Image (cartoon, helix red, strand yellow):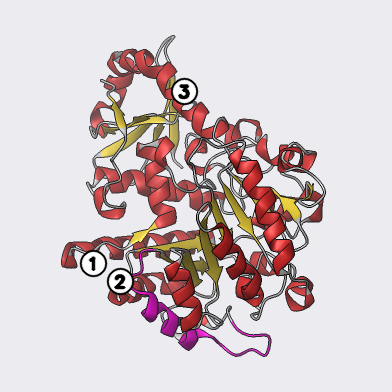
Amino acid sequence: MAQAISPLWGPSQAAVNAGAGPHFDVLEVGHPDYVALINADTAFWVLSPRAEALDYLLGGELPKSYLEKEARLAADLETVRFKLLPSAVYFNPTERCNLDCGYCYLPREARRGGSDMDPARLLEALAKLKEFFVNTLPEGARPQLVFHGSEPLLAKDAVFEGIAKYGDYFRFGVQTNAVLLDQEAMDFLKDHGAGIGISLDGPSPEVADRTRHTWAGSGVFAQTIKVLEELIGYPGLNVITTVTRENVRSLPELVEFFHAKGLTNVLLNPVRGTQKGGRDLMPDQTELAHYFFAALDRAFELYEKTGRKLVVGNFANLLLGLVAPGARRLMCDISPCGGGRCFFAVGAGGEVAPCSEFLGLPEFHGGNLFESSVKDLMATLAFVQVTTRVVEQLEPCKHCAVRHFCGAPCPAEVYATNGSLNAPAPLCDFYAAQTRYAFKVIADGRLDALLWDNWREGLEEIVVM
């Protein structure tokens, strides 16, 4: 698939319509020398020297060259948004959790005393999922299946039986709070090549334990660090930080901490407001932007100093969305989001929803995996409402220059916050600021330093101008 990589020549926002040509927005990106010129319909952009921006637009050179490639660019964006096949499942084998994290996207009552899926039932579910993917994906494709939570290792016997039986077909992962991840469990997951995701919300127990603790209120920082240190160097390791008002000011220090531990990839995910706890813990957007960008700046400084990268995956995904739309690895910052079209979620009772965030919202359950085919479940109104939610139909998103770099996420938290899917993201201002910062990163020549190695492999450059 062809990708657009814009040449480096080059919300306060002004619009220029160059005669009968395409519409471009002029976006301030916080750089002393450059502004971004964006055709929002196709997500095409260039960075232009400030003094020459209007010349590029009104002189006709850019619009003419762009129009020659417009159909190709539009087709690429159309493919990413509407033509990808489902290839992943987030699978909750239990409703229960041994922690009471303040921001969890699942209802508290279910986490405290919910049900588990027994081994036989889990194997039955995996068989049905395999049948669906065999009939939809190209031959030889291996879909991803992440055992998610609540805490999946509370159903460890069922999970490990599933991995042992279907490890040659699914690419398995386990997202865990690490409390139950003992040496035997780690060895099993490593032996089967499973991804291991663990959660850590701060560089010290004073920060991390504010929101992540047991039902009795005890922190789990020490256990998490012990597991983290055991897994350093394992290629399937990923660490997720949920950014809240309790840890937002610690993000630069946390980046230093992760880099010192030898990590190469982390996620610094702003909290989702799907449940009241998450909404109550949302940081101020201006403060979030300040400390999040400071953390990224620190990651770059450490790379320059040591030659070792620490890639912040959610921001790197935005960078990919700018320079190579089809190469993005995450599908939250585009509309429709990936929920219900690139992936879906299965709950402990077999309930199926477009995304894990919707498992706690019963009105978005399409039905039950043990009662209906996956194909039929994905055609239900619960799914269609999500897969047809596009920024072109949202106010004020449809007027925004960066609408295809933000995607107005997340529909589950939008619904939980507003009672409707037809609203912008609660962190809208932050996402706009993040896009402007991303353009500044590119203008400063820091793109490769903040992306994964070899990110250009397999991409085709479309030259405009």
Q: Quadrant of the C terminus?
A: top left
- Crowdedness of circle 1 by 10 Å Cα count: few (<14), some, many (20+)? some
Rendered position, 253 above or below 85: below
**Distance in Å between CA atoms under marks 2 and 3:** 39 Å
In the image, residue 143 sits, relative to residue 290, either above or below, namely above
- Residue annotated with mark 1: 302
Relative horizontal placement of residue 172, taking residue 119 as reference (left or right): left
Is 219 contained in the magenta span? yes
Image location (x, y in percent) of residue 11: 46, 42
Looking at the rendering, the stretch of residues picked out in magenta corresponds to 213-235
Q: Which residue is depicted at the point 38% across and 75% down?
A: 231
Instruction: Label 2, secondary structure: give it.
Output: helix
The residue tagged 2 is 259
How dense is the environment of label 2, judged by Cα within 10 Å: few (below 14), some, or many (20 and up)? Answer: many
- Residues marked 1 and 2 touching at CB (< 8 Å): yes
Residue 154 is left or right of residue 41, and the answer is: right
Q: Nearer the viewer, residue 119 or 277?
A: 119
Residue underneath mark 3: 74
In magenta segment, residue 60? no
Above or below for 213 versus 300: below
Badge 3 amino acid: Ala
Q: Amino acid at mark 2?
A: His
Q: Secondary structure at mark 3?
A: helix
* Residue in front for this viewpoint, 143 or 309: 143
- The reply to whether residue 180 is in sight is yes
Tell me: 161 left or right of 172. Answer: right
Residue 446 % position (x, y): 24, 50
Q: Secondary structure at mark 1?
A: helix
Give the residue displayed 48% in from the left and 70% down from the top.
Answer: 189
Q: Are marks 2 and 3 in contact (CB under 8 Å)?
A: no
Residue at 54% from the left image edge and 83% from the top image edge:
209
Measuring from the top left, give residue 284's x and y in whole percent. Answer: 54, 63
